[in-house]
Amino acid sequence: MGKNLFRWTILIVLFLWALPSWSALDGERLYRNHCMVCHGEEGGGGVGVPLAMPSFLNNVDDDFLFKTIRHGRPGRVMPTFEYLSDAQVNALVSYIRSWSDQPAPRFSLEPIKGNAEVGKKLFAERCEVCHGETGEGGKGTGVTMSRPRDLPIIAPALNNEGFLAAASDELIRHTLRKGRKGTPMVSFLEAGLNDQQIDDIVSYVRSFEQTAERKPVLEAESASLIVESPYSFEETVENVRQTITGKNFRLIREQYMDTGYVPEGQENKKQLILYFCNFNFLNSALTIDPRVGIFLPCRITIVEQDGIVQVMAINPMRLSRIFNNVELNEACHEMRDVYTEILEDATL
């Protein structure tokens, strides 16, 4: 019996070994659900960086990928995935790693000793033009409209707490030494710096931990703004039209809420959406983050139900939280004020 049990154990182990990696399969599903919309179906990039780019994937370790997924980049485009379990994050890392035919590099977690003061001067000379004066990173997202067209990606924020938590000193040093082929990031060794100077820059970047602050991301009590109108449905619609044009917005079109969902002519005439736009605002918002286009042009909905007329709009202050882009804060505040004024003025 002992021998038979041993044989069966061996057969089961061999069978399980021959099965596809469940971690990889789970990782693909998780990637498609959580990452693909920004990083592309095959990791080619978009709003997010191109993860499958060899000069990136072959030069970062799995610890960096894990911590980047876990901590994100607060205030930038990369959100925090704190709700995923460690096993799920590891599955994602395994799936992303499968795009490379090379083993993951390994980097020491030991701090690098350099002269941060010297590194600060070198940073100003060599790094500031892309990463910003204080390491705040490039402006915009990875989408072409929101970045200079000659840049394939936006320079990351080096003073970001998420980056500093994910990147070891040796990984930063390795990046400075090797560069990122296919991006503006050059090899600093080839650019003329020596190892000591590179270590000095690493020490300066690490010093950002002492000054890095969590970027504020907007919070909102509600995803929508709703007010009740004391006027009839028709009077409220006309009030909203006049208020929109009075705020220097152009009324683009009007559409019943259920248009396209019911046969033409059977739409509910007491549910109307008014679309409007200020093109200067639209262009500036799209430049900050093209994903705002999902919510543009601006729209206000007027609905009458059971004799009660309500005027409603989305709350733009939710956008910064959804997109994790602190640069949207000012635009979100501005648009929320506009919506609030229109809703209040139309229902006074």
Image (cartoon, helix red, strand yellow):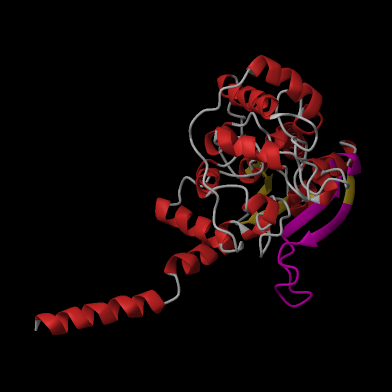
Asked if residue 271 is among those painted magenta in the image, a careful observer would answer: yes
Which residue is at 72% across, 62% downward? Answer: 257
- Image quarter hosting the N terminus: bottom left
Image coordinates of residue 271 in percent, x first then y, are: 71, 59
Q: Nearer the viewer, residue 34 or 292?
A: 34
Q: Nearer the viewer, residue 62 or 235?
A: 62
The image shows residue 197, relative to residue 56, as above or below, that is above
Asked if residue 119 is among those painted magenta in the image, a careful observer would answer: no
Q: Which of 223 and 31 is in front in this view?
A: 31
**Viewer can see residue 308:** no
- Image quarter hosting the C terminus: top right
Q: Is residue 328 left or right of residue 102?
A: right
Among the 4 quarters of the image, the one containing residue 43: bottom right
Image coordinates of residue 187 in percent, x first then y, are: 75, 40
Q: Is residue 121 left or right of residue 99?
A: right
Which residue is at 67% across, 46% downward? Answer: 314
Among the 4 quarters of the image, the one containing residue 79: top right
Image coordinates of residue 124 in percent, x first then y, are: 78, 22
Q: Nearer the viewer, residue 55 or 24?
A: 55
Residue sitting at the far left: 1
The image shows residue 42, relative to residue 241, as above or below, that is below
- How many numbered discs? 0
Residue sitting at the far top: 117
Q: Is residue 190 left or right of residue 107?
A: right
**Viewer can see residue 89:** yes
Which residue is at 48% across, 35% downward? Answer: 109
Give the magenta range.
Answer: 252-281
Image coordinates of residue 16 in percent, x first then y, are: 35, 76
Among the 4 quarters of the image, the one containing residue 212: top right
